[in-house]
Image (spheres, rainbow, N blue to C red):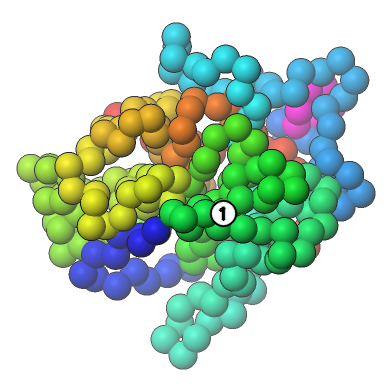
Amino acid sequence: MTAIRPPEAARTSEGRPWAAPGPGAGCGPGGVRPAGPGGPPHPPPGAPATRPADAPYQRPGAASAGLRPIDCLITHHPRVPRDRMGRALHGSGRSLILEALATVHGRRLTPRHLTRDEHLRWRVPALGLHASVSHCGTLSAVALSPDTPVGVDLQDERDRPGAMTWLGTLLGLDEPATIGDFAACEALIKVSHLTKETFTGVRVPAPAPGWRPTGAHPYLVCSLILGDGTHLALAAGAAAPVRWWHRPRPGARAARSHPPNQERA
């Protein structure tokens, strides 16, 4: 799997913390329920596995029945080290996935538990999970999915005219692509067999709330904007509900959170 890399090299920007929600944003009655290494997060007795807020991404009449939710953990890294050029130096994708598994699912695994298929998609066979990871600036995102392959990507909002013109041409647009388009393309490559060499002809849908079909059937994308302006895109093979988690720093307990702002047309 080769990610799309436009002519302008990607740079990172200093992100601001994505504010965690206040009381009432947890699963079921009682507000936020933190998850920790002591065990997997469970809703209160009698509460459903997901809340209505977990599934705004399912277009009316197009939801896939019976799918278990995708968990997406967003972590703020306030003290991320930087290289001599000022670029953020995050941990490896493998280490970020292992941290997410411990934080969200309460399972402490080792690198040998992670595999990648012929398209370089992450798998956790011991738990029956698909995984994807991205980082940008001071944020990282890990998506864990039990029922469908998943791709996640983060992109910061900044001026990249040459790159966006190049991507717009690749997507068959009459104007430069947006940063949201860029994130959606990266997420699609992570979830599928696509590469930059085979991406020509794929179409990314216009911004709108919810899962949106793409030109790469059966894959769908949903696009969101985090509180600091960072674009997040999720791609999956079916319209599953999404459970959002937030950590203010690495090592902190994760809490269920409100969905980030959805991108609107």
Note whether residue 143 is visible.
yes
Percent across and percent down for residue 156 are 40, 58
Q: Residue furthest top?
A: 61
> For the view shown, which residue lies furthest in the left direction?
174
Residue 94, position as x, y percentages in the image = 63, 64
Quickly name the residue at label 1.
Answer: 122
Q: Residue placed at 44% from the left, 54% from the top?
A: 119
Image coordinates for residue 187, horizontal then vertical, percent: 41, 48
* Residue positioned most to the front: 118
Residue ID at (34%, 69%): 10
Asked if one can make out residue 183 in the rendered structure from this viewpoint, the answer is no
The magenta span reads 26-31
Depth check: give the residue in front, 124 or 244.
124
Residue 132 magenta-highlighted: no
Type of amino acid at the residue the image marks with label 1:
Trp
| Vertical placement of residue 25 versus 36, above or below | above
Looking at the figure, which quarter contains the C terminus?
top left
Label 1, residues with CA under 10 Å away: few <14, some 14-19, many ≥20: many
